[in-house]
Image: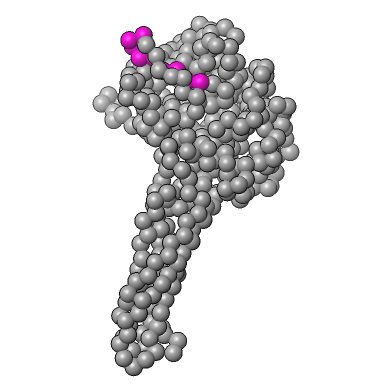
Amino acid sequence: MAPIRTDARRHRRGAAVAVSAAFGALVALPLTAAPAGATQTEEHCVYSAATGDHTCYPTRAEAQSRAQDQGSDVARASGEVIGAVVFEDENYGGSSLTITVPEPCPKNDKVDFWLDLGDDWKNRISSVQAWSSCWVWLYPGSGDRAGPYKDNHSTVGGHINDRTVTVGLS
Amino acid sequence: MRRGTRMAAVLTGAAAIVGALAMPGVASAADEPTVRQLLEECEQGRTDVCEFHPSGSPEVYRGSYELAGGAQNCSEGTSTRVIRWESSQTTTNSVGVTISAGVTLGEVFEAGYEASFSQEWSWTTTKADEIRHELGPHQAVDIFAAPMRERVTGTYEMHFGDPYYGHYYWYVHDVVVDGPASQPAWDVKVESTTPDC
C-alpha cells in the first residue's frame, strides 16, 4: 500500500472548507460560512483517508447514526473500516475525529496513513483509540513522535497532550 | 483488547455497522444480521477480532433506592432497634444479551474498559450494614439503599475471517453497560410505613 498524506480541515457544519484528499485529489465540500464570532462547540467528525471526505455532526450519537447510514453504503463500495478515533479531551471527551481507512493497517512496519491536522484540530488531541489493526502515532510540530498507541488510551501523556499536528496510522 | 488472531493478509472486504438500537433477535433485513446475531458470533469465538471501545467517559450516577430492610415496634413503649440491611447490585446492558463476568462478551468489555480507564469494572457488589433507629409505639420503618452506579456506552468492533453477511467488519454501536460504581458510596434513607402488628 502506498502511503498517503492527507490534509483534513476540521470545520463547523457547512463551513467553507476544501479538503486535500487522499492520493492528491482535491475535494471541495459544500460551503456555508459560519457566523463570525460563533462559539466553538463540540462536534464529531468522520474523515475518510481514502476519499478525503470529511463530515461533522454536533453530537457523537448523530455522527454514529449518520456513519451507519454512510457506513453501509460506503463500506459496500470501498470497504472502509475505522482505523482510529482521536478526542479533544481526556477520557474520550469533547470533540472527536473518527478516521476511516480502506482496510486494516497491514502491519508492514510502515506508517501507512498520514493525516495532517487542520488548524482547528492542531494541538488539541488528548485521548486516542486504536481501532482495527492500526496503531496510532502522534507527531508534534517539533518532528518528534509519540506512540504507538495500540489500544484505547484515556490520556496520551503530558509530553504530547495538546501538541499533535499530524496523526499517523501503522 | 485484541482477541484471536489478526488477519495476516489484508482483506478487501466491506464494513458495515449495526446500531444496537435495533430490536435484538429480530431481523431487520434479510441481508443484515441482528445485534444479537453479531454479538453471538463474538461470544462463540467465531470472530478474528472482537473489541470494545467506549464512546466517552463513564457516567456515574445515583442508582435507584431499593428496599433493603426494615423493622417495626408493636409494643406500647419506645424501642431502639439495630436494623440490619443488605442490598446487591448487578450489571445490566441495553442489548438483551449476556454481558457478564465469565462470558466472552463480558471479558471483551472488561478488557476494553480496563484498558480505557485504568480501573477494574465491578460486575456486582453487595453491601450490608446496620443502623440504629428509635421506634415509637406501633411504628414501623423501611430502609432503602441506593448505591452509586456507572454506565459506559461503546462499540463492539468485530472482524471476520470470512465474510459474514457479506462483510468482513461489523460494528455494534451504542451498547450500554450499566453496573455498580467501582467504589460505590451507598446512600440510605429510612421511611415510615404502616406496622403489621
Residue A167, position in %: x, y? 43, 17
**Residue A123 position in % (x across, y down):** 33, 20
In terms of image quadrants, where is residue B58? top left
Percent coordinates x, y for residue B99 in the rendering: 58, 47
**Residue B71 or B98: which is nearer the viewer?**
B71
Give, as a single range, the part of the protein colored magenta. A135-143
Q: Is residue A36 visible?
A: yes
Q: Residue furthest left?
A: A37
Q: Is residue A27 among the parts visible in the rendering?
A: no
* Nearest to the observer: residue B119 or residue A54: B119
Q: Where is B6 relative to B45, above or below? A: above
* Placement of A111 over or under B146, stated as above or below: above
Q: Quadrant of the C terminus of chain B?
A: bottom left
Residue at horizontal 46 percent and vertical 43 percent from the top:
B120
Q: Quadrant of the N terminus of chain B?
A: top right
Q: Position of residue B67 (x, y in %)?
A: 45, 69
When asked about the image quadrant of residue A142, the answer is top left
Q: Quadrant of residue A19?
A: top left
Residue drawn at point x = 57 percent, y = 34 percent: B51
Q: Residue at x 35, y 68 (%)?
A: B189
Q: Is residue A138 left or right of residue B6?
A: left
**Residue B77 is inside the magenta segment:** no
Give the answer, above or below, for where A114 lies relative to B139: above
